[in-house]
Image: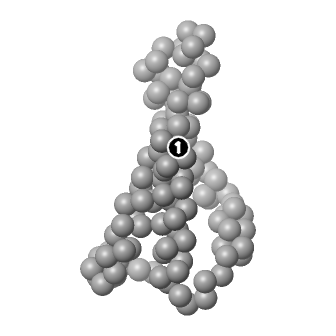
């Protein structure tokens, strides 16, 4: 288990890690923004639910779905982990993660 203090020490020791963390948060933001819009578009477009209620429902359901899937199964994460092996080379793993995040944000924007 990593402590918050150790996490910040790792960021100070490796500034590229801070960049990767910002990119990951960018991916999460972009994914949430596009998911929410897609999830409520039809309901709002047909005027079957008010916009504010649809946004609240989307936020709550996306959060519950995320928590439920993390508690139920880690199969997707385990599959991705098994596909790529960087060994003990953390820098290559961070570069690959940063490249993937840049691709996700670029594609979504």
- Tell me where residue 60 appears, x and y as whole percent: 50, 36
Q: Is residue 32 visible?
A: no
Taking the spot 31% from the left edge, 76% from the top edge, the residue there is 15
Q: Is residue 99 visible?
A: yes
- Tell me where residue 19 appears, x and y as whole percent: 36, 67
Callout 1: helix, strand or loop?
helix
**Furthest-top residue in view?**
47
Identify the coloring: one colour
- Tell me where residue 61 appears, x and y as whole percent: 56, 37
Taking the spot 60% from the left edge, 45% from the top edge, the residue there is 65
**Furthest-bottom residue in view?**
88
- Tell me where residue 36 appears, x and y as whole percent: 52, 34
Q: Nearer the viewer, residue 81 or 90?
A: 90
Q: Assign the N terminus to one quadrant of the image.
A: bottom left
- Depicted 1 relative to depicted 37: above or below: below
Q: Is residue 77 left or right of residue 59?
A: right
What residue is disc 1 on? 108
- Depicted 22 relative to depicted 30: above or below: below
Taking the spot 55% from the left edge, 90% from the top edge, the residue there is 88
Q: Nearer the viewer, residue 104 or 41?
A: 104
The 10 Å Cα crowd at callout 1, few under 14, some 14 to 19, many 20 or more, is few
- Depicted 104 relative to depicted 85: above or below: above
Count every numbered label the image shows and give the total. 1
Taking the spot 50% from the left edge, 59% from the top edge, the residue there is 101
Q: Nearer the viewer, residue 17 or 43?
A: 17
Q: Is residue 4 left or right of residue 50?
A: left
- Depicted 5 relative to depicted 103: above or below: below
């Amino acid at each position: 288990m990593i402590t918050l203090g150790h996490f910040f020490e790792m960021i100070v020791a490796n500034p590229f890690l801070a960049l990767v963390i910002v990119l990951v948060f960018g991916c999460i933001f972009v994914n949430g923004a596009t998911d929410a819009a897609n999830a409520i578009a039809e309901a709002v477009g047909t005027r079957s639910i008010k916009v504010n209620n649809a946004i609240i429902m989307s936020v709550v359901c996306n959060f519950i779905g995320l928590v439920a899937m993390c508690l139920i199964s880690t199969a997707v994460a385990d599959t991705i982990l098994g596909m790529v092996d960087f060994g003990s080379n953390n820098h290559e793993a961070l570069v690959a993660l940063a490249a993937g995040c840049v691709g996700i944000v670029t594609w979504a924007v």
